[in-house]
Image (cartoon, grey):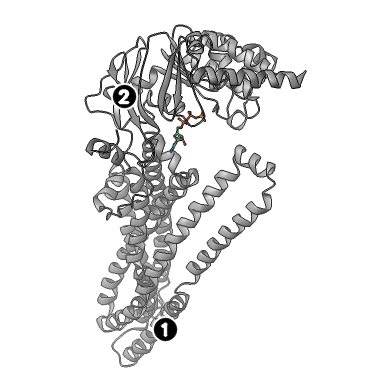
């Protein structure tokens, strides 16, 4: 029965895309924690920035001494020292810059690796419901480009903020020492540069956010249409021009957003750049007056103007600092949103399920994928260790759902699934899944060699075991005919092999895993008779000595099952052995005779 508080609790654990994302303020502490492993490098970066800022102050001073002292005194030795000083400070600053660049990369790339790893690790622990509800492209974008943005925040935004602050502070102190009156004039210009930027920054932030959403969309379309299944669909329905138009439309949206982003505040920017030129002109004006009236040397005013660049450029960069920080937070927020999604849960005191006998019990199991529609409506059954249980019934009846509750791909809202009498929610997920092997109709293979795909089940299997599994699955002889044998690359998702070959590889893979419980979901549908026979032969060693739950649309494949459950509308309506069910002349008998007649009709047409 659905409803009631425990059910509600179960629901709150499932991923729900419609649930509004709680946009919490990302805590600064959480961001800083990411930097913790790199404290030493970050401190060195600060030291480099400080030294860089101090060294940058020297060339104008040498210029001043050159103009005011060395040249008037006709002292070539002093000229040499001043010019040498300029060159040396530039060379040392450049060398420090290179080292700082290295440290920046180290920290930026390190943090990216850490975030990407924890993101992928977290995604691995997300429930299946998350993956059925979320577009693959969005997930990919989160793991790739969002994390890339972290790099620009760490090595770009943060470093430039600190550098600009250091440069400004050191410069302000120096110009006040040089001449406080000119310094006040120079500083008075800064607010004129900064104030107009605030609204521009806010607009930029909004557009950036929409740009990122558009990129998610583009990534999703690319993922869906350029996968092997997607492209097959496009080609077979001749939808290339539709897809091109769709892609063009989204691409155009992105283009417009990017142009707006590039153009927003361009006039303000132009004004600021003008101020960077106008500022020194004002200082020259006032400075010249001071020189003429004897209050300042020519060298000092030249040095002063040289310092203005170190004042205005950082000031204009810092004008948008608030936006930069908010944007940086937004980058982390998108990542933290993912990291905060509730993963598959285990009880804190979950025990390790050792090697099981393989008894499977369903006890009044109710389950629904969404609150308004129930998929299983009070399913109860028991399969003895080593038995083969078959599930038959119309499409959408709930057969696959039943099998998916065994390895806890989903949890029932009420009732219990037990293995050897132990509730599957009381054991660790890893130990539970170690005991369960699954072969589905849609076989997934990695774009790798046959051997690597087989070894995925057990990387330490010795070569003889790999071959033995392939032999047992009736695929070894085929592999032997391939020029590269076990080193043959299977292609994207195994599409260089036939459906039947893929399926037999999947069976060999599960044989290598050697689980006590086996789930076979429609393993023999959509195959020709020869292939079906080959797979039937492969299934014999697979089901031997294991508890197996088999879903088959072709009843011919499950005639030997110890027990057959007929599933209709999320309930088990009949159960028993084949002969027994035929005799009782119920739902199973109707299903059987219908298939028998259909098959006979097909064979009659074929002859
Ligand atoms: P078939 O023989 O066609 O594979 P089945 O008996 O295995 O069907 P299930 O796949 O268990 O049926 O599906 C049972 C019901 O649950 C169906 O109505 C289906 O639409 C629904 N369903 C299956 N998977 C999901 C999902 N991820 N989210 C929401 N509903 C789902």
Q: Residue at x 40, y 57 (%)?
A: 156
Q: Which corner quadrant of the image does residue 40 belong to? A: top left
Asked if residue 312 shows in the view, the reply is no
Report x, y in % for residue 358.
Answer: 37, 12
Position in image of residue 490 (x %, y %): 62, 26
Mark count: 2
Given contact means CB atoms under 8 Å apart, are the residues at marks 2 and 1 in contact?
Answer: no
The picture places residue 364, in percent across and down from the top left corner, at: 31, 24
Camera-nearest label, 2 or 1:
2
Quadrant housing the C terminus: top right
> Image quadrant of residue 532?
top right
The answer to which of 255 and 40 lies nearer the viewer is: 255
Q: Which quadrant of the figure has residue 77?
A: bottom left
The answer to whether 528 appears left or right of 284 in the picture is: right
Q: Residues within 10 Å of mark 2 (few under 14, many from 20)?
A: some
Which residue in the structure is indicated by mark 2? 364
Q: Residue at x 30, y 36 (%)?
A: 2
Res 188 seen here: yes
Ligand 1 within 8 Å of disc 1? The answer is no
Distance from Cα at disc 2 to Cα at disc 1: 81 Å
Front-most of residues 350 and 593 = 593
Above or below: residue 20 compared with residue 273: above
Secondary structure beneath disc 1? helix
In the displayed structure, 166 sits above or below 269; it is above
Q: Nearer the viewer, residue 525 or 222?
A: 525
Picture coordinates of residue 416 (x, y %)? 30, 24
Query: Callout 2: helix, strand or loop?
Result: strand
Mark 1 packing: few (<14 Cα in 10 Å), some, or many (20+)?
some
Identify the mark nearer the N-term, 2 or 1: 1
Q: Residue furthest top?
A: 545
The residue sitting at 33% across, 36% down in the picture is 343
Q: Which residue is mark 1?
A: 278
């Amino acid at each position: 029965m659905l409803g009631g508080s425990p059910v509600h609790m179960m629901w709150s654990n499932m991923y729900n895309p419609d649930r509004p994302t709680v946009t919490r303020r990302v805590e600064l502490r959480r961001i800083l924690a990411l930097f913790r492993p790199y404290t030493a490098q970050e401190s060195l970066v600060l030291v480099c920035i400080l030294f860089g800022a101090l060294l940058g102050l020297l060339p104008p001073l040498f210029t001043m001494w050159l103009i005011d002292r060395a040249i008037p005194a006709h002292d070539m030795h002093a000229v040499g020292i001043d010019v040498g000083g300029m060159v040396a400070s530039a060379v040392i600053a450049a060398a420090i810059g290179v080292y700082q660049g290295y440290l920046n990369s180290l920290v930026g790339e390190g943090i990216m690796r850490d975030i990407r790893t924890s993101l992928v690790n977290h995604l691995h622990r997300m429930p299946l419901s998350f993956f059925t509800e979320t577009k693959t492209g969005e997930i990919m974008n989160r793991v790739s480009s969002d994390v890339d943005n972290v790099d620009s925040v760490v090595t770009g935004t943060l470093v430039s903020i600190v550098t600009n602050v250091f440069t400004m502070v050191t410069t302000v102190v120096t110009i006040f020492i040089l001449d406080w009156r000119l310094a006040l004039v120079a500083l008075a210009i800064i607010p004129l540069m900064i104030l107009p930027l605030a609204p521009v920054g806010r607009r930029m932030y909004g557009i950036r956010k929409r740009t990122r959403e558009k990129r998610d969309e583009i990534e999703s379309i690319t993922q869906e249409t350029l996968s092997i299944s997607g492209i097959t669909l496009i080609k077979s329905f001749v939808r290339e021009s539709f897809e091109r138009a769709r892609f063009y439309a989204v691409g155009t949206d992105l283009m417009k957003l990017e142009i707006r982003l590039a153009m927003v505040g361009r006039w303000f920017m132009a004004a600021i750049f003008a101020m960077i030129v106008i500022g020194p002109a004002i200082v020259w004006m006032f400075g010249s007056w001071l020189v003429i009236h004897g209050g300042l040397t020519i060298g000092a005013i030249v040095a002063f103007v040289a310092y203005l660049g170190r004042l205005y450029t950082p000031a204009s960069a810092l004008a948008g600092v608030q936006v930069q920080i908010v944007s940086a937070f937004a980058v982390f927020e998108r990542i933290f949103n993912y990291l905060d999604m509730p993963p598959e849960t285990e009880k804190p005191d979950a025990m390790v399920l050792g090697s099981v006998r393989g008894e499977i019990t369903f006890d009044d199991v109710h389950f629904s994928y969404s609150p308004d529609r129930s998929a299983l409506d009070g399913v109860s059954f028991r399969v003895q260790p080593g038995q083969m249980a078959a599930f038959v019934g119309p499409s959408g009846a709930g057969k696959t759902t039943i099998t998916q509750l065994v390895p806890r791909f989903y949890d029932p809202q009420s009732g219990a699934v037990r293995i050897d009498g132990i509730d599957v929610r009381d054991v660790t997920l890893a130990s539970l899944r170690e005991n369960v092997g699954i072969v589905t109709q849609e076989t997934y293979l990695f774009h790798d060699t046959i051997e690597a795909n087989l070894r995925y089940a057990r990387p330490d299997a010795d070569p003889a075991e790999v071959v033995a599994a392939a032999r047992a699955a009736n695929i070894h002889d085929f592999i032997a005919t391939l020029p590269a044998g076990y080193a043959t690359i299977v292609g994207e998702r195994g599409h260089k092999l036939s459906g039947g070959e893929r399926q037999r590889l999947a069976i060999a893979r599960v044989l290598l895993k050697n689980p006590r419980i086996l789930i076979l979901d429609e393993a023999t549908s959509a195959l020709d008779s020869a292939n079906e026979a080959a797979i039937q032969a492969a299934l014999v060693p697979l089901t031997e000595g294991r508890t197996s739950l088999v879903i088959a649309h072709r009843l011919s494949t499950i005639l030997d099952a110890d027990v057959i459950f007929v599933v209709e509308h999320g309930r088990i309506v009949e159960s028993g052995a084949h002969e027994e069910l035929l005799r009782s002349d119920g739902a199973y008998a109707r299903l059987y005779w219908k298939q028998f007649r259909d098959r006979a009709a097909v064979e009659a047409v074929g002859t």
